[in-house]
Amino acid sequence: MNAITIDEVKQAARRLAAVLQATPLLPLRPAAAVQSVYLQPELFQVIGSFKIRGVYNAVTQLTVQQRAAGLSTVSAGNTAQALAWCARHFGVVARSLMPEGAPQTKLDAVRKWGGQPIVVSRDELFRFLREERWNDEPYAFIHPWTDRNVMIGHGTIGLELHAALPDLAAVYVPVGGGGLIGGVAATLKQLNPAIRIIAVEPVGCAAFHASLAAGRPVAAGCDTICDGVAVPYFTQEVFDRVAGFVDEAVLVTDDDVRLAVAQLAQINKLVVEPSGALAVVAASQQHDPAAGTAVALVTGGAIEPSLLADLLTTPGATPSGDVGVDGEGP
């Protein structure tokens, strides 16, 4: 896969200009006298997550004939929503394989945009990906991680961060299959080679962390509340692209994520899904204000109302670090 160029990301930004909601950088509250951690709340995008960036960019690169055949993807929910939105925008159909146990909120949202969720077992879903079964179907398939145009679209986040904070010291990025960090890291490292890219995964699903330790892609168990990043393996092509850009890989616990979701709602007034809170936990626990300013990517807000209510009333286990409590983290 060819390296992503800044010119390609800038072209994607122009294509996305009419689609994206301007995303403000918000201070993580409460803050110390000197703010050190900001949030990039991608949950403000039209489908509630960053996925619209990559998916829209990829769909626009298809021919009219390819789009007319219909669009297809595999998704825990947010990519499927983005694909359904794009299909409605272009007047075509969209179907998405989604795993059993996907949040009802995400299934309903896909249908709301006119998409068709096809619910299958997790084993069947990942078999479809590993065996590239989309080649047997008529649809134009948008791979959520390995599609280069998806990564380029996600790279527009990097452009925005660099424009807003040219001296940004670090960015904390949630990792599932690697499409987001692949685009953001490639963009930011070209604009500012000194910036630190920190990959964040849940302890219960840490294929990238395990792959870095092994020096090659390896599979890992996957048991986490963070359904949006619940990917049990890394592909060789994405690993080769991402590993060289990442300065550190951080693991956080589900208990800390639960508490972060509650605190983001109560203190920062942001409704965030568990996967979307991963980077916030890591930045709170890891970032040293003396190192400069950091940004945590808040990637999505599709959380089941019942789960949010539970987390707000019973935050769960005591975290290993404070999220948004004092100025030593944010």
Image (tube, rainbow, N blue to C red):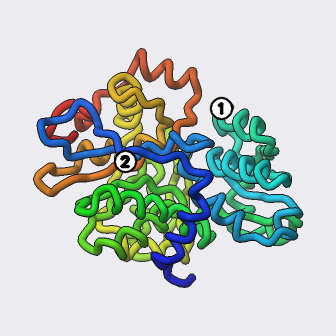
Residue 240 visible at all: no
Image mark for residue 306:
none
Q: Tell whether label 2 touches label 1 (CB within 8 Å).
A: no
Mark 2 belongs to which amino acid? Answer: Ala
Image mark for residue 279:
2
Q: Residue at x 75, y 70 (%)?
A: 62
Q: Quadrant of residue 165?
A: bottom left
Mark 2 residue element: helix
Q: Residue at x 34, y 36 (%)?
A: 256
Vertical position of residue 204 compared to residue 213: above or below: above
Towards the viewer: 56 or 220: 56
Mark 1 residue element: helix
Image mark for residue 105:
1
Q: Is residue 119 left or right of residue 35?
A: right
Q: Residue at x 48, y 65 (%)?
A: 155
C-alpha span from label 1 to label 2: 22 Å
Mark 1 belongs to which amino acid? Answer: Thr
Towards the viewer: 53 or 204: 53
Earlier sequence position, callout 1 versus callout 2: 1
Picture coordinates of residue 46, whole percent (x, y): 61, 42
Picture coordinates of residue 54, whole percent (x, y): 59, 60
Towards the viewer: 261 or 300: 300
Q: Residue at x 42, y 63 (%)?
A: 159
